[in-house]
Image (tube, rainbow, N blue to C red):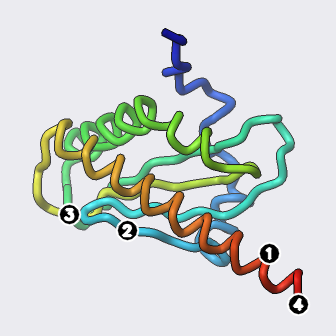
């Protein structure tokens, strides 16, 4: 069995303010309650296929301890399932993951939602590519 790359190194973390601003202005989004993913195709400057950030709103969790806990869960679920995205994308993306609920889900529930969110992203991504191919053929 092939060993999967289950790491989340620093170079894969979304840190650039410019890219984050671009995500919020021109990014597209997919949701699978309570998770939301905003994504935008990015230039491959670091030779990294995915740059990822996570966020938990202060609106839902007032204490930083709680926000950090859910950010940790999001990063862990992403780390375990990112291979699904890597196998199905053809260009680099910058993505931001949001936890948008007051409900305190367990790691297993968040992991299941993350898988469904990634499946939805892959489906939308393939649909967008099909539209681009059809318009180019005409």
Nearer to us: label 2 or label 1: 1
Residue 49 locus on image (x, y percent)? 71, 41
Q: Residue at x 77, y 77 (%)?
A: 132
Residue appearing at x 31%, y 57% in the figure: 99
Mark 4 or mark 1: name the one nearer the start of the chain: 1
Q: Secondary structure at mark 1?
A: helix
Residue 56, placed above or below residue 100: above
Residue position marked by numbered label 4 in the rendering: 138
Q: Nearer the viewer, residue 57 or 126?
A: 126
Question: Distance of mark 4 from mark 1, alpha carbons?
Answer: 9 Å
- On residue 133, the disc is 1
Q: Residue furthest bottom?
A: 138
Q: How crowded is the residue under tag 4: few (<14 C-alpha within 10 Å), some, or many (20+)?
A: few
Contact (Cβ within 8 Å) of mark 1 with mark 3: no
- Foreground: disc 1 or disc 3: 1
Q: What's the CA distance linking mark 2 and mark 1?
A: 25 Å
Q: Is residue 36 above or below residue 97?
A: below
Q: Earlier in the sequence, mark 3 or mark 4?
A: 3
- Mark whose residue sits in front, 2 or 3: 2
Residue designated by label 2: 31
Q: Position of residue 121 (x, y in %)?
A: 50, 61
Q: Residues within 10 Å of mark 2 (few under 14, many from 20)?
A: some
Q: Are marks 2 and 1 in contact (CB under 8 Å)?
A: no
- The circle drawn on residue 101 is 3
Give the spatial CA distance, label 1 vs label 3.
37 Å
Question: Circle 4 — which element?
Answer: loop
Quadrant housing residue 44? top right
Residue 77 in percent (x, y) is at 35, 36
| Vertical position of residue 127 compared to residue 72: above or below | below
Percent x, y of residue 39 = 59, 62
The image quarter containing residue 2 is: top right
């Amino acid at each position: 069995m092939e060993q999967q790359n289950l790491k989340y190194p620093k170079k894969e973390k979304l840190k650039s303010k410019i890219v984050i601003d671009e995500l919020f202005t021109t990014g597209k989004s997919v949701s699978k309650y309570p998770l939301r993913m905003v994504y935008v195709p990015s230039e491959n400057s670091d030779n990294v296929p995915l740059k990822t950030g996570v966020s938990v709103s202060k609106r839902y969790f007032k204490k930083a301890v709680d926000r950090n806990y859910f950010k940790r869960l999001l990063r862990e679920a992403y780390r375990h399932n990112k291979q699904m995205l890597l196998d199905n994308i053809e260009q680099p993306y910058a993505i931001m993951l949001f936890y948008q609920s007051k409900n305190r889900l367990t790691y297993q529930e968040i992991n299941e939602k993350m898988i469904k969110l990634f499946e939805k992203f892959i489906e939308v991504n393939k649909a967008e590519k099909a539209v681009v191919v059809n318009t180019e053929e005409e």
